[in-house]
């Protein structure tokens, strides 16, 4: 479980870094899609982890 | 225990970040970036080999995946195939980027709608979201429609030894590329640069 939490935190990090990278390279549509597409499952997963704790 | 279904969905949507590959320099430390793809794919195969041999247990796996190749391997294989065919000049960049993002988001959307509202809504939700993603990235409705129809069609059938995570990537990009290269489809800007 500890590894899974660590892995999930890496996933959040990857989404943020990738979106920022596309944004600063002026690919606004791709950056927005990455954020919009990941925000709901990311939020639900965070909620699930909080409830689990 | 975290919600396994949501964990699977998030893993799926995060796969959209694979498109960062297109921002990598062509050569990394003097080696072509395609070697990075091969290295990544080998890493995935290695993880799957040890998982199937029982060396460790991964969270988020479905029950039926305990004895067969997991969805993440199929998805990674599909993405790596797209990268390879892009590098050898077969798939246009704009199709590669849009298909990877579409497949990452549409498969979980179809799954969620199927579960909550039934298969018909799943198909429609998949079709609409796919058209929106393709249209936003490619900007040509013809390809958005063709790619979306193929994506939704190949997502439906279930095969034991071939997963929809691979099919939902390979078939739409293949069909769109055939239309584009044959001249049956309208002309378009194939580089991602035009999105700036």
Image (cartoon, coloured by chain):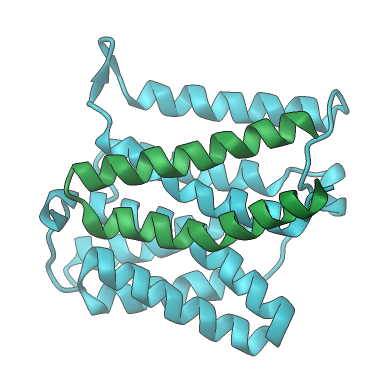
Chain colours: A green, B cyan
Q: Is residue B80 above or below residue A44?
A: above
Question: Who is closer to the viewer here, B157 or B120?
Answer: B120
Q: Is residue B33 above or below residue B105?
A: above
Residue located 42% across and 72% down the image: B130
On the question of residue B103 being in view, the answer is: no
Residue B122 % position (x, y): 61, 81
Residue B28 % position (x, y): 28, 17
On the question of residue B147 being in view, the answer is: yes
Residue located 24% across and 47% down the image: A23
Question: Who is closer to the viewer here, B31 or B90?
Answer: B31
Q: Is residue B48 left or right of residue B9?
A: right
Q: Is residue A10 above or below residue B99?
A: above
Q: Quadrant of residue B142?
A: bottom left
Q: Across the whole image, how many numbered discs are drawn on residues?
A: 0
Question: Who is closer to the viewer here, B3 or A52?
Answer: A52
Q: Quadrant of residue B53?
A: top right
Residue located 84% across and 27% down the image: B56
Residue B109 % position (x, y): 57, 70
Residue B126 % position (x, y): 52, 76
Q: Is residue A19 left or right of residue A8?
A: left
């Amino acid at each position: 479980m500890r590894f899974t939490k660590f892995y999930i935190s890496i996933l959040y990090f990857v989404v943020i870094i990738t979106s920022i990278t596309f944004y600063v390279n002026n690919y606004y549509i791709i950056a927005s899609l990455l954020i919009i597409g990941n925000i709901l499952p990311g939020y639900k997963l965070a909620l699930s982890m909080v409830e689990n704790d | 225990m975290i919600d396994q279904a949501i964990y699977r969905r998030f893993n799926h949507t995060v796969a959209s970040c694979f498109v960062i590959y297109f921002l990598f320099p062509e050569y990394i430390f003097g080696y072509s970036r395609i070697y990075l793809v091969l290295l990544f794919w080998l890493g995935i195969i290695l993880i799957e080999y040890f998982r199937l041999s029982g060396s460790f247990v991964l969270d988020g796996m479905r029950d039926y995946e305990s004895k067969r190749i997991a969805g993440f391997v199929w998805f990674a294989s599909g993405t790596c195939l797209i990268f390879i065919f892009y590098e050898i000049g077969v798939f246009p960049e704009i199709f590669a980027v849009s298909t990877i993002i579409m497949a990452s988001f549409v498969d979980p959307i179809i799954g969620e709608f199927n579960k909550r509202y039934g298969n018909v809504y799943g198909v429609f939700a998949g079709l609409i979201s796919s058209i929106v993603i393709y249209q936003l990235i490619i900007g040509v409705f013809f390809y958005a429609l063709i790619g979306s129809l193929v994506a939704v069609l190949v997502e439906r059938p279930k095969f034991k030894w071939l997963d929809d995570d691979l099919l939902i990537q390979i078939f739409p990009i293949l069909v769109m590329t055939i239309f584009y290269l044959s001249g049956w489809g309208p002309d378009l800007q194939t580089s991602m640069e035009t999105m700036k």
